[in-house]
Image (tube, rainbow, N blue to C red):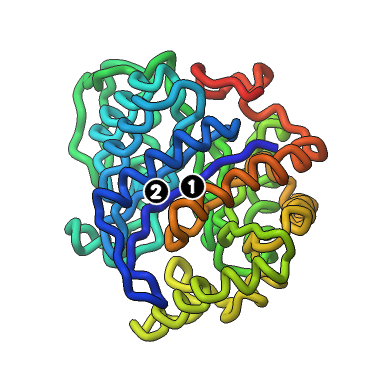
Amino acid sequence: MRFQVLDIVFNPPHPVTGETVAPADRLNRVVDTAVLAEELGLDSFAVGERHAGEVLSSSPTVILGAIAARTSRILLSTGVTVLSLLDPVRVAEDYATIDQLSRGRFEMVIGKGNEAAQYPVLGLDIAKQYEYLQENYELLRQLISGEEVTWSGTHHVPLDRITTLPRPFAGPFRIWHGSATSAFAVDLAARWGAPIVSANAFQPREAYKVLIDRYREQYAEHGHDPAKAYVGSGSGGLFLADTTEQAVEQYRPIYEGAVARADARGYDPKAVGKVTAFRTVEEAVERGPALVGSPERVVEKILDYHQSYGHDLQSVSVNHLLDVEQQHDVLRRFAEEVVPQVRAEVKTDLWTEADTGRATGFTAV
């Protein structure tokens, strides 16, 4: 199995103390964490994108550029590029630049996002989010794959023999599809033979398993090699302690404080992307995807979920509300006490030489 660290760059006040982190500090911590992830031998680091809410990832290309300058091995990714909101021409230009700066260490994950408030801010109709996503994806594929692209669609202006610059480092970078609760994303990915990343963050595993199974079935039906139907999975947070009981108690104030704060703002408890349906940290650990516990328990849980998903990539997020030393300690323990055991149990050719679609500048060890 491969391992990724994802930071969506949330930056709300601490739900218990009310303390805030200065944007400059929060953004620099993202870069520092990516450097640490590389030092720890993890495979990938991803940066999210949001244009509404208490989030600082409105410009992920700038963050990834800073990370590219301070790293040399780790694969860089997005999580997700909200392609339904963006101009595919600018996306092709921006991320080919990241691909060049990192010397071919970039892959992209696209999606429509799960923050409805982004659409009116950018003058777009949320009712057309799936239309935007499909058209923008199909145009982006052409722009990064070839030169002198001519295009006529519904939402983007026509293009006549357009070549975006810079070109990708060594051929088109791979595009994954982010999947949460809609069948649209997995259907689109399967049609084009692209991999998916399941959010696996807020809902019971059955909701995600249905879509992963659907993806694999359709992938094969479209004539693609089932062995290349790569699947990534997110997680509902990561926190480690010597015992699961200690981890639960230490994580409780942050987890349940965040749930209470979201409720106070009037969010639907079941709204994906807002607050989980799991009301307590015990529920999140026992019935949800949260990786909270002893290293041994987290290993067991990842392997248990792998029985359901068969995923090749495990993405984790360390809660930004922990102090920096605690965040880094959790990540170190994960890399040293969890990752080797899971890697020994779950084999995949993702990002190896056998994976011909991988980023050309990265090969997993």
Give the labeled residue for mark 2: 48
Up-down: is 275 above or below 23? below
- The residue shown at (44%, 28%) is 106
Q: Residue at x 43, y 71 (%)?
A: 274
- Residue 6 marker: 1
Q: Quadrant of residue 81?
A: top left
Name the spot of residue 102 as percent of width and height, x first: 39, 22
Q: Secondary structure at mark 2?
A: loop
x 44%, y 49%: residue: 7
* Residue 222 percent across, percent down from the top left: 63, 37
Question: Which of pointers 2 and 1 lies earlier in the amino acid sequence?
Answer: 1
**Contact (Cβ within 8 Å) of mark 2 with mark 1:** yes
Residue 316 visible in the current orientation: yes
Quadrant (top left, top right, bottom left, bottom right) of the N terminus:
top right
Residue 134 in view, yes or no: no
The relative height of residue 14 versus residue 58 in the rendered view (above or below) is below
Residue 31 x %, y %: 37, 39
Q: CA distance from mark 2 to mark 1?
A: 7 Å
Q: Is residue 4 left or right of residue 26?
A: right
Q: Please identify the quarter of the rendering in which residue 362 is found.
A: top right
Tell me the amino acid under the disc marked 1.
Answer: Leu
Q: Is residue 2 above or below residue 19?
A: above
Where is residue 283 shown, x and y percent of the image? 66, 76
Residue nearest the viewer, comparing 298 with 306: 298
55 or 240: nearer the viewer: 240
Q: Nearer the viewer, residue 170 or 315?
A: 315
How crowded pointer 2 is (Cα within 10 Å; few <14, some 14-19, many 20+) is rated as many
**Picture residue at 42% right of the left edge, 47% below the top:** 80
Q: Secondary structure at mark 1?
A: strand
